[in-house]
Amino acid sequence: MPDDPQLRLALNEGPFHAALRAAVEARGLTLERLRRHLEERGLRVGMTSLSYWQQGLRRPERPESLRAVRALEEILALPPRSLMGLLGPPRPRGRGQGARSPADDGEPAVPLAGSAHTLSALLHDLDGVADDRRLHVTAMYETLQIGTDRSATRRETLQVVRARRDDPDRFIMVYRGDLGCDVERVRIRALEDCRVGRIRRDGATALVVAELLFGRALEAGETQVIRYELADPSGVETTEYERTFRFPADQYVLRVAFSPAALPARVRRFARHAPGPGDRDPGDHGADEHGTDDRGPTGWEPGGREDTESAESALTLNAHHAVHLVTGPFGPGAVGVRWDWP
């Protein structure tokens, strides 16, 4: 058995996700390194799946996933079947049992599956609702900084909103960090033409909701420029950033800048297109009060099976170690950038 007492206890008592997480921490490997080790053995497991496994949000049950678990025992220098034994027997399947449990390789289980209810509760606490259309995003420019530890350390957003009707006096931003994000460490700072009001946080779903106050109520047709900064020092390695739009926006620009000491091997842009808001469940995931959602890396939750992702296209780092994308009218849906680490 391993010498590490915490790892030894986790392997003896479980559950599976706690043992996997303890083994990864004990060996000092990142999820990206684990993914690459698995790929070298002919096993393709995504970063998101690995992250969900060690957080207990998904359970490996498919045959290829179980082969990956056996390979992880070798990669992490664990006794044979030490992880497999913690999974227990396969879950019942078939008619009357459900084709798949929410906690297996399919949809994430609680807490992510409950994030829509959590978001609604957080918005309600700020006197907001998820489908409020009082503001229209006419332009948004944001820049994301990736640090030497491969985490998203800072994001600055400049946006212009137009009042659809009288009375809006604030923008409510919603941020969901990566799995492992410490929401208590997330900081929001108003930079221009707004101030930070109330903030609500939920650690289980990595959600942060905050008011950005204009200082006065807008009249219909008036515009407001706001600039704010969000810092997440959690240090969680990331491979993706995306911005979701519940309602159409006129223009969106995203710039992602990498530290010269941590450059990606490959970068590409992507987009997910969704049905119009009238076609979606009113309790759908992932919308802030005014139609956009500040997503942390890998934080998008599809709103339904009708969501489709467009083909990815490659982006090239410029001389300043950055890439960018520009969209014209876009939404509802999500657009973003993802990358692979060497």
Image (spheres, helix red, strand yellow):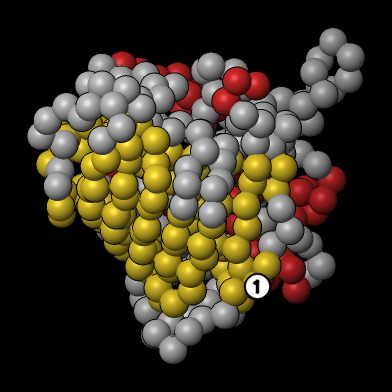
- Specify the quadrant of the image occupied by residue 40: bottom right
**Residue at 61% from the left image edge and 68% from the top image edge:** 268
Instruction: Locate residue 79, reporting x and y percent.
Output: 66, 58
Residue 290 occupies quadrant: top left
Which quarter of the image is occupied by the N terminus? bottom right
Q: Residue furthest bottom?
A: 319
Q: Nearer the viewer, residue 265 or 322?
A: 322
- Please state, as top left, top right, bottom left or bottom right, where the C terminus lies in the image: bottom right
> Relative to the observer, which residue lies in front, 264 or 283?
283
Q: Is residue 316 above or below residue 213?
A: below
State whether residue 228 is above or below residue 36. Answer: above
Q: Is residue 183 left or right of residue 169?
A: right
Q: Position of residue 52 (x, y in %)?
A: 57, 44
Say if residue 220 shows up in the picture. Answer: yes
Seen from the viewer's position, the closer of residues 88 and 303 is 303
Left-right relation of 254 to 44 = left
Which residue is painted at 62% across and 29% down in the image?
Answer: 276
Return the x and y of residue 316 as percentages of the image width and height: 57, 80
Position of residue 251 relative to residue 285, above or below, is below
Specify few, some or many for label 1: CA neighbours under 10 Å numbering under 14, 14-19, or 20 or more.
few
Residue 68 figure quarter: bottom right
How many numbered markers are drawn? 1
Judged from this view, the residue extending furthest toward the top is: 96
Q: Under tag 1, what secondary structure?
A: strand
Q: Is residue 280 above or below residue 209?
A: above
- Judge whether residue 104 can be spotted in this image: no
Q: Residue furthest right?
A: 95
Which residue in the protein does label 1 denote?
314
What's the residue type where badge 1 is placed?
Ala
For the point 35% across and 31% down, which residue is it? Answer: 135
Which x, y percent locates residue 258?
A: 41, 75
Q: Indicate left or right for 213 with 222 as reference.
A: left
